[in-house]
Image: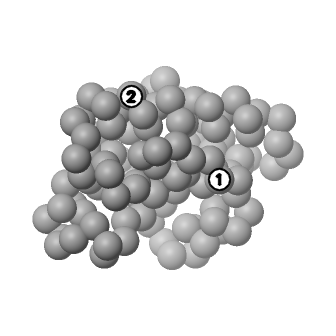
Amino acid sequence: MEKKFRLRKNREFKVVYKRGKNFWNKDFTIFIRPTKRKTVKFGVAITKKFGKANKRNLIKRRIKEIIRLNIENLKLGYEMVILPKQNTLEISYTELEKSLLKLVNFAFKKVLDWEV
């Protein structure tokens, strides 16, 4: 995922947590916030409860790859933080992709009318 599509600073994450809305399913929780920018920005946050760094990095790489491959299908003008849940370690890549995209599209529909 390119740098222009990433949330990188701690304060960027905090703004999305504080001013965004959250949505969840059995695999993910996402915080989404509309912005006036003409881009979409993503951040992935994962806790140490997942295990050692290699497991956490595996999940982050998978999520970033799903976003990279589907970025042109996503709506512009949003910032989003994705929080995977513990069971994402056991499911396959295709199930992970299906679950994440379904949740993101659901969140876009719900936040559509929300004021910036």
Residue 80 seen by the camera:
no
First-in-chain label (1 vs 2): 1
Name which residue lies at 17% across and 73% down: 52
Apparent side of residue 110 relative to residue 1 in the rendered image (left or right): right
Amino acid type at mark 2: Lys
Residue 85 seen by the camera:
yes
Residue 22, numbered circle? 1
- Tell me where residue 14 appears, x and y as whole percent: 60, 72
Total tally of numbered discs in the picture: 2
Q: Secondary structure beneath disc 1? A: strand
- Tell me where residue 97 appears, x and y as whole percent: 35, 32
Name which residue lies at 24% across and 63% down: 56
- Tell me where residue 115 appears, x and y as whole percent: 85, 45
Amino acid type at mark 1: Asn
**Residue 60 against residue 15 in the figure, above or below:** above
Apparent side of residue 33 relative to residue 88 in the rendered image (left or right): right
**Residue 113 against residue 80 in the figure, above or below:** above
Task: Return the residue at label 2.
Answer: 98
